[in-house]
Amino acid sequence: MFNEVTIKKNDKAIPIYYDQLFELYSNGKKMRYDEFLKMHHDVFKTKIQYNIRYDDTAFLEQGDKVAARVFISVTKPNEPMHEIEVILIAEYKDNRLYRLWELTYPDWSKMKAFQRKGSDKTKN
């Protein structure tokens, strides 16, 4: 899913992998499906590139939930690469991502690479 949406920068795949009632809880902030889709649409228009590395020793799947530790590298032209450590719990519903709780370091929403015109990051 991450590869098909984020690595390929394909916001059109979000409805395939994410439930319409999807909610992201990231670093104490909440984002619903429509805002998540819009943010990815805007960010994917930029020259941002992603790579992911999984910590295989910190991955657990049980029923419709997954807990994991991953490292996401974010690069943009003429900017240094940033690596974000993510600790997450994901819940699926009907084979689509339904809820995602995550803590990231650093807080991705405060990074310049994710700032959008006319937007104030994620909502509480």
Image (cartoon, helix red, strand yellow):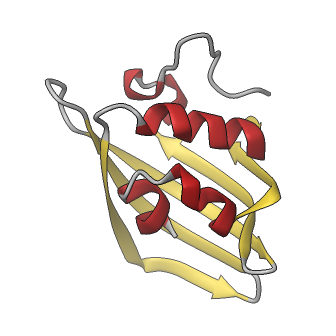
Position of residue 63 relative to residue 105, above or below, is below
Residue at 59% across, 47% down: 103
**Left or right: residue 104 compared with residue 94:** left
Residue 17 position within the rendered picture, expressed as x and y whole percent measured from the top left: 64, 68
Position of residue 43 relative to residue 55, above or below, is above
Which residue is situated farthest in the right direction here?
21
Position of residue 82 relative to residue 61, above or below, is above
Which residue is situated farthest in the top direction here?
118
Does the image show residue 38?
yes
Q: Quadrant of the C terminus?
A: top right
Residue 6 position within the rendered picture, expressed as x and y whole percent measured from the top left: 44, 55
18 or 12: nearer the viewer: 12
Residue at 54% across, 38% down: 41
Residue at 41% across, 66% down: 3
**Left or right: residue 70 compared with residue 67:** left
Residue at 28% across, 34% down: 47
Residue 53 position within the rendered picture, expressed as x and y whole percent measured from the top left: 32, 66
Position of residue 32 relative to residue 43, above or below, is below
Which residue is situated farthest in the left direction here?
78
Residue 45 position within the rendered picture, expressed as x and y whole percent measured from the top left: 41, 34
Does the image show residue 107?
no
**Left or right: residue 73 compared with residue 102:** left
Which residue is situated farthest in the bottom direction here?
63
Q: Residue 46's quadrant in the figure?
A: top left
**Left or right: residue 101 compared with residue 1:** right
Q: Residue 84's quadrant in the figure?
A: top left
Label count reads: 0
